[in-house]
């Protein structure tokens, strides 16, 4: 009853704002985006969570190289289905958004995505 699924988590940034990439070059700057999807009896991660190629720039506010996404970005979560029954994928995304002048405090947003039986 195993098969692979791929979830797309879409972030839409308002004009002028950006969200940080999954890995960042250093840990003493902005927080990277983190997607957490704990495994259950119904599913588990089937590989690394991926993202499109981010913009890479030297950020004067952090005095370091940062990697980010603007506009709309889709983070791709590969899952392995372990049951033929319907289930709900639950997880959370922790992210931080900034513009040219300021950053907002990090936020954690939970998500639930129903997957039908097959």
Image: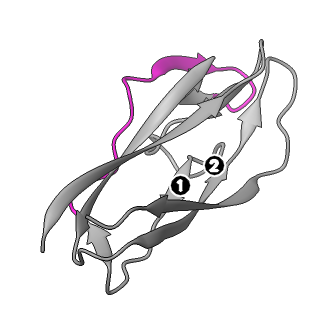
Q: Which quarter shows the C terminus?
A: bottom left
Identify the residue at image location x=79%, y=22%.
Answer: 99
Give the residue furthest to the front. Answer: 118
- The x and y percentages for residue 89 are 47, 67
The residue depicted at 41 percent of the width and 61 percent of the height is 115
Q: Position of residue 57 (x, y in %)?
A: 53, 17
| Residue placed furthest toward the bottom | 41
> Are the residues tagged 2 and 1 within 8 Å (C-beta)?
yes
Q: Label 1, secondary structure: give it.
A: strand
- In the displayed structure image, the side of residue 43 where residue 13 appears, left or right: right
Q: Read off the magenta span.
A: 46-63
Q: Which residue is mark 1?
A: 34
Does the magenta portion include 8? no
Above/below status of 105 relative to 71: below
Task: Please name the residue that numbered disc 2 is placed on.
Answer: 31
Would residue 112 be found to the left or right of residue 18 on screen? left
Q: Residue at x 32, y 79 (%)?
A: 42
Picture quadrant where residue 4 is located: bottom left
In the image, what residue occupies the spot 32% across and 87% down? 41
Can residue 74 be seen by looking at this rendering? yes
């Amino acid at each position: 009853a195993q098969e692979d699924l791929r979830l797309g988590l879409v972030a839409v940034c308002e004009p002028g704002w950006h969200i940080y990439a999954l890995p960042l070059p250093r840990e003493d700057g902005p927080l990277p985006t983190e997607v957490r999807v704990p495994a259950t009896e119904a599913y588990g991660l089937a590989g690394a969570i991926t993202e499109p190629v981010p913009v890479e720039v030297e950020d004067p506010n952090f005095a370091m190289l940062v990697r980010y996404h603007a506009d709309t970005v889709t983070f791709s979560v590969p899952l392995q289905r372990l049951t033929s029954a319907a289930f709900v994928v639950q997880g959370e995304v922790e992210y931080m958004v900034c513009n040219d002048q300021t950053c907002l405090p990090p936020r954690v947003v939970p998500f639930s995505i129903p997957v039908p039986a097959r």
